Image (spheres, rainbow, N blue to C red):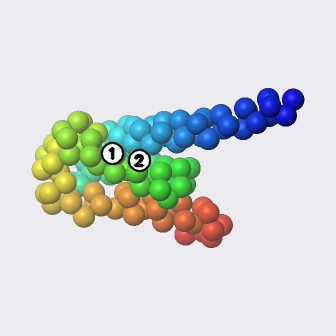
Amino acid sequence: MHEAQTAALSLLPRALTARRALAVPLGAALVAAAAQISVPLPGTPVPVTLQPLAVLVVGGLLGAPLGAASLLLYLALGAAGLPVFTPFGVPGLGRLLGSSRAVCGAPCSSARCRSSWAISGRSP
C-alpha cells in the first residue's frame, strides 16, 4: 500500500506540469478569441473588444507567471502574423510597432496585477 501511494505522488508533478503547459496556450487562445469580438469606434484606431476582460480572467485564473507567459505567447503569435489581434488595422508586427504599441504591452502587466490581487485577497 505504501508503494502505491509513493507511485501516485511521483506522478503528481508530471500531471501538474502537463496542466500548466496546456493552460498557457489555452489562455492565449481565450484572449485571441475575445479580441475577435470588436466594435470599431469612430474617430479612433482602437476598437472596443472583449480582450481586456479575457486578460483579467487569464491573469486571475493562471496566476502571475503563467498568465504573463500566456499573454506573451499571444503577442508572439500576433507578431508572427497569425490573426489573433482584432480584425481592424495592420496585421502582424506592424500592429505591435504602430500607434497601438502601448496598448499591446498592457495585457502582460494587467495579468500580473490581476493575479497579484487574487493572491493577496485585495480588490482592485
Rendered residue at 67%/37% (across/down): 10
Foreground of the two, 4 or 67: 4
Q: How many marks?
A: 2
User: Which one is in front, 33 or 4?
Assistant: 4
Residue 87 in the figure: left or right of residue 1: left
Residue 5, numbered label: none
Q: Quadrant of residue 87?
A: top left
Frontmost residue, 104 versus 15 = 15
Q: Secondary structure at mark 1?
A: helix
Tell me, for residue 70, which label it has, or none.
2
Amino acid type shown at disc 1: Tyr
Q: Position of residue 15 (x, y in %)?
A: 60, 35
The quarter holding residue 25 reads top left
Q: Quadrant of the N terminus?
A: top right
Task: Tell me which residue sits at (72%, 32%) in the image.
Answer: 7
Q: Position of residue 21 (x, y in %)?
A: 48, 39
Q: Is residue 31 above or below residue 117?
A: above
Q: CA distance from mark 1 to mark 2?
A: 6 Å
- Element type where label 2 sits in the image: helix
Q: Residue 106: which quarter of the image?
A: bottom left
Image quarter of the C terminus:
bottom right
Q: How far from the left and from the top, in percent, is residue 119?
A: 62, 63
**Dot 2: within a 10 Å radius of its alpha carbon, few (fewer than 14), some, or many (20 or more) residues?**
many
User: In percent of the image, x 19 and y 54: which residue is there?
Assistant: 96
Task: Assess disc 1: are there few (<14), some (14-19) or many (≥20) residues with their C-alpha within 10 Å of its C-alpha.
Answer: many
Side of 39 relative to 7 (left or right): left
- One can see residue 89 in this view: no
* Residue where numbered disc 1 is placed: 74
Callout 1–callout 2 Cβ contact below 8 Å = yes
State whether residue 91 appears in this view: yes
